[in-house]
Amino acid sequence: MRLYFGNGHARQDQLPEDLQCWVRAQGARLGHANTLTEPPRPLVIRREDTWLNIRLIPDSPDFLLVLEEEDSKVTSRALHQLGLTPRESEVLHRVREGKTNKDISTILRSSSRTVGKHLERVFAKLGVETRTAAAARVHGPA
């Protein structure tokens, strides 16, 4: 918890204040009927290479908190399992960083046209049609 919330809470047997506020707000949405008008949204806290998804699950008479930590890095092994070449993996990595084809061509010292061809092959291998879909297909939010 310290990695995501710091040492801001005084007691170790309590949730950090930010998390307590979120739980209270989610609990208030439940009201007396113990039903939600819409599914509760998770609290997502991002760090450099990971993020923490926190979900509140109503369970009478208490609430359950489910915490899931995910690694936002995509390993070359994972990309290889998708059938991408090292160069296609590098191009996709740069797309996930929000780089344009021109930016990527400068970084990789190739032409924009070559980057475009790499992306065409990436799209075909991943079964997607857009840069955003390719980035999301590999591992959730960049």
Image (cartoon, rainbow, N blue to C red):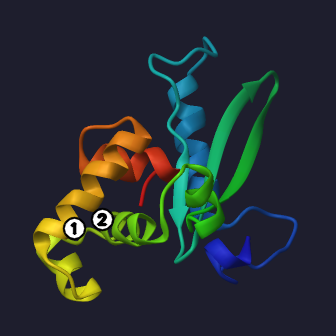
**Which mark is in front, 2 or 1?**
1
> Tag 2, which secondary structure?
helix
Mark 2 = which residue? 95
How packed is label 1: few (under 14 Cα within 10 Å), some, or many (20 or more)?
Answer: many
The x and y percentages for residue 75 are 61, 67
Q: Quadrant of residue 129?
A: top left
Image location of residue 44, percent across then percent down: 53, 55
Alpha carbons under labels 2 and 1: distance apart: 10 Å
- Residues 78 and 22: in front is 78
Image side of residue 51 versus residue 9, left or right: left
Amino acid carrying mark 1 in the image:
Val
Element type at marker 1? helix
Which one is nearer the viewer's eye here, 54 or 97? 97
The residue sitting at 12% across, 66% down in the picture is 113
* Residue type marked 2: Val
Q: Residues within 10 Å of mark 2 (few under 14, many from 20)?
A: many
**To which residue does mark 1 refer?**
115
User: Which of 74/72 is in front?
Assistant: 74
